[in-house]
Amino acid sequence: MEKIEVITGVRRRRRYSAQEKAFMVAECERPGMSVSLVARRHGISASLLFRWKKLMKDGGMSAIESGDE
């Protein structure tokens, strides 16, 4: 017998504050941590976390405040 997955609701996109983004980016810099590990722990994609890291490197905190995720 096959299993069928039933989707019952709409999952809304989560928005993160600049402080939350900065915390996750800083967490990647800790010894023994990686972008992939931090992303998994917070339930986000690694590519999103890499994007936040690049934005912070290029423009600091103000760059991630204007982001849409």
Image (cartoon, grey):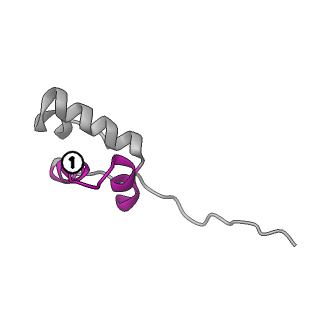
Given residues 35 and 2, the one toward you in this image is: 35
Q: Is residue 22 magenta-colored?
A: yes
**Residue at the outermost top position:** 58
Instruction: Give coordinates of residue 68: x percent, y percent.
Output: 30, 39
Classify residue 8 by image quadrant.
bottom right
Instruction: Give coordinates of residue 15: x percent, y percent.
Output: 30, 51
- Residue at 87%, 73% in the rendered image: 1
Check the image and report above or below for 54 versus 32: above
Q: Magenta stretch: give its range.
A: 19-44
**Residue at the outermost bottom position:** 1
Neighbour tally class for label 1: few under 14, some 14-19, many 20 plus, Cα within 10 Å: few
Classify residue 5 by image quadrant.
bottom right
On the rendered structure, is 14 left or right of 56? Answer: right
On the rendered structure, is 3 left or right of 32? Answer: right
Classify residue 63 by image quadrant.
top left
Circle 1: element type: loop
Instruction: Give coordinates of residue 40: x percent, y percent.
Output: 41, 57
Question: For the C terminus, which image quadrant?
Answer: top left
- Residue at 43%, 55% in the rendered image: 12
On the rendered structure, is 2 left or right of 60? Answer: right
Check the image and report above or below for 47 versus 32: above
Q: Read off the residue under disc 1.
A: 29
Check the image and report above or below for 21 versus 59: below
- Residue at 18%, 49% in the rendered image: 26
